[in-house]
Amino acid sequence: MKFICSKENLLDGINIVQKAVSSKTTFPILEGILLEADDKIKLTGNDLEIGIECYVEADVKSPGKIVLNSRMFGEIIRRLPDAEVLIEVKEKDVVVIECESSLFEIRGMSPEGFPALPSVEKVNGIKISQKIIKEMIKQTIFAVSMDENRPILTGSLFEYKSGTLTIVSIDGYRLALRTLKPESQVQDYSMVIPGKTLNEISKIIQPVDEELTIYATGNQILFDLGNCTMVSRLLEGEYLNYSGIIPKEHETMVTVNTKELLACFERASLIIVNDERRYPVNLEISDDMMVITCNTEVGNVREEIKADMDGKKLEIAFNPKYFIDALKVIENETVNIYFTTNIGPCTIKPVQGDDFAYLVLPIRK
Amino acid sequence: MSSSMRRVIFLVDMNAFFISCEMANKPELKGQPAAVAGNPKNRSGIILAANYDARAFGVKTTMLIHEALKLCPGLILVPPTHNLYARKSREVMEILSRYTPVLQQNSIDEAWLDLTGCDLLFGEPLAIAGRIMDDIRNELDLWCSIGISDNKFLAKMASERKKPLGITELWKKDIKRILWPLNVREMYGVGKQTEKRLNEIGIMTIGDLACCDANILTNAFGKYGNELKKLANGIDTSPVTANPKGESKSIGRSTTLSKDIVDIELARSVLLRLAEEVGEEARRSDFKGKTVSIVIRYSDFRTITRQKSIPLSFLTRDIYRTGCELLDENWDSNKPVRLLGIGIANIDEDMPDQLSIFDVNEDLDDEIKREEKLERAMDQIRSRFGSDMLKRAKLVDGQKEE
């Protein structure tokens, strides 16, 4: 194998596939990147949870393949001058890396043991702009659970049902839901993607208008960005029936300015210096105003915000972090907040439509 | 308080607590035979608590659902809502604490009160007991029985005499007549195992135990033997110790191994057995912990403790799983271990009560709820039939650790 490519392109490819390379594993080969030269070169990282392959333009002199330790290879390429890089495999898996006046000879690994990416049949694909899917993931991933005792909740649900794609995360105390009606129509499916891999995937997706395609099969989900493909394992098990969790009725509804409310919560939580679970933020909702208060060992704070109320007056307490996380990712200028009781769920929704829903459980006083 | 003053100790025991909480919440259950059952949809579940209408048909705690339905075809089955019971229990304790700050909660549905010297404030013990019973009945729509004596053991034994809605005094002068003819199994503190061993040395009744030669008991049970004899004679000097509020609380178990061990698999089995005991006690007292700790003492007596945070839990599964993680992280296979321990703790119980989706959607199919039901059912079976009745496969013979 022998090829020449630009350092910049190669480094971009390495940075992408490194997101799928294990840092600690008992199989040294999983700490490697597979390089394959054909008419282009293809880089592959695979930690068996997530697999990423990425094509890089190159002048291929002779085809072949080799596995290089990801950290070593990445560091070497990163520190080379911005110029053309020549990579050649010699006898006994020795790899030569040459760039201007630098010359490395490092030991590679035989590509035989490298796990192939699971093959995913490219049918049933949904095309979505990269920018939009990146937003949707960001708007839901924060509510993924860290609690290994409910493994299914450590992932996000991707559900396609009668023309709507819904992403849902639930950590037990809150729920984040985002919907989209993509133009492509596919068969209904429901799958749960591990939060960790989804996070890596969203880093690779760029905030650009170009589309990617999402293919779903029984055991894998594949994101196809053209020059780069990501395949993630799925979590097994039944996800919670999220639509049953979101209340259909409410006792109190307020309409507020999203940014102003976010600012109120952020200011109120300034005096929570230790542990936000310990100090709830209290909401007192009356006719045209919401009063937000908080008492901690530091002192107390009171915030007033204009709010159109419909229904009963209510006093309720929350962990402010749950509201802040949700309000931060909402782009709408105003939102409706629906309350049931002071020990029941509260849901933030758009004033019109059903693009998103953020449900938060209160703190019992 | 002078030391000569006679102590006045109450044991307040809530009658058919779980099902009564359900009846207070759902009045339509009143006057009907009803029971809280492990999983009513599954006919092999067990009865956790039956109301008195159901008991009239012969329905008893730990009975299998289909057996209960055979006795009482009209039996209404209600799934358990432990949050409700924990809340009602707190409300009961609040009422009790109006009468004395010296209150020791023994389980979710019973507590000892030390009312020594309170007669000037509230009246004679019988009158106070009547007021407590009325308060709980009027404010919470729940029934209780109250035992009165001058120590915790006799108060507990007295409370068992008349249920529901009984107020019973039991003093040292009455024990020959009332306690001694009873089977030892009826004695508070004597479980299935102890009963078996007492029977083996010819002790059948509490009277046999009271009159037994102290040496025989010490030989058979060690120090505990003497304790048992004293209790059977109505002697119990243990104080009512108020449950500390807002302070750290913990439940732990440790064991000195009969042989030093180096095998981590063996250590895991030991931890599992201990975690089962810790979990059982934690569930019985509705105490959820947020840290799990393990203790490892090596044969050279060097001892380490390591701990890890978990989401609030009282499940054996979580205690054991976290214990194993700690073991894996700290196990040194070159050093023989002579003692292992595991426990859970909660640094403060004053943490506000963040509600979860699983609290407000009771019918949500959830693996943690299922695990809790399973472990509670195991607790019930063990408390009824002895702890050897049910064993985890890991602890069945062949995996003997000591």
Image (cartoon, rainbow, N blue to C red):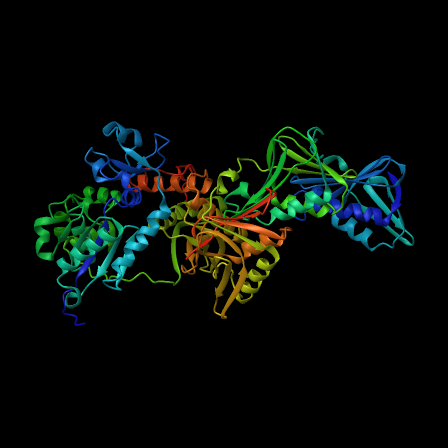
Classify the position of the C terminus of chain A by image quarter: bottom left
Left/right placement of residue B261 relative to residue B7 reads: right
- For the question of whether residue B342 can be seen, the reply is no
Left/right placement of residue B273 relative to residue B215 reads: right
Residue A150 location, x and y as percent?
51, 43
Q: Which of A189 and B227 is in front in this view?
A: A189
Q: Which of A307 and B221 is in front in this view?
A: A307
Number of numbered discs overlaid on the protein picture: 0
Residue B197 location, x and y as percent?
23, 44
Q: Nearer the viewer, residue B162 or A254?
A: A254
Classify the position of the N terminus of chain A by image quarter: top right
Residue at (30%, 29%) from the top-left corner? B66
Residue A38 higher or lower than B259, as above or below: above
Q: Nearer the viewer, residue B134 or A289?
A: A289
Residue at (62%, 51%) from the top-left corner? A330
Q: In terms of image quadrants, where is residue A257?
A: bottom right
- For the question of whether residue B363 can be seen, the reply is yes
Left/right placement of residue A200 relative to residue B283 reads: right
Residue A301 higher or lower than B214, as above or below: below
Residue B91 location, x and y as percent?
30, 55
Left/right placement of residue A290 relative to residue A160 reads: left
Residue B246 location, x and y as percent?
38, 63
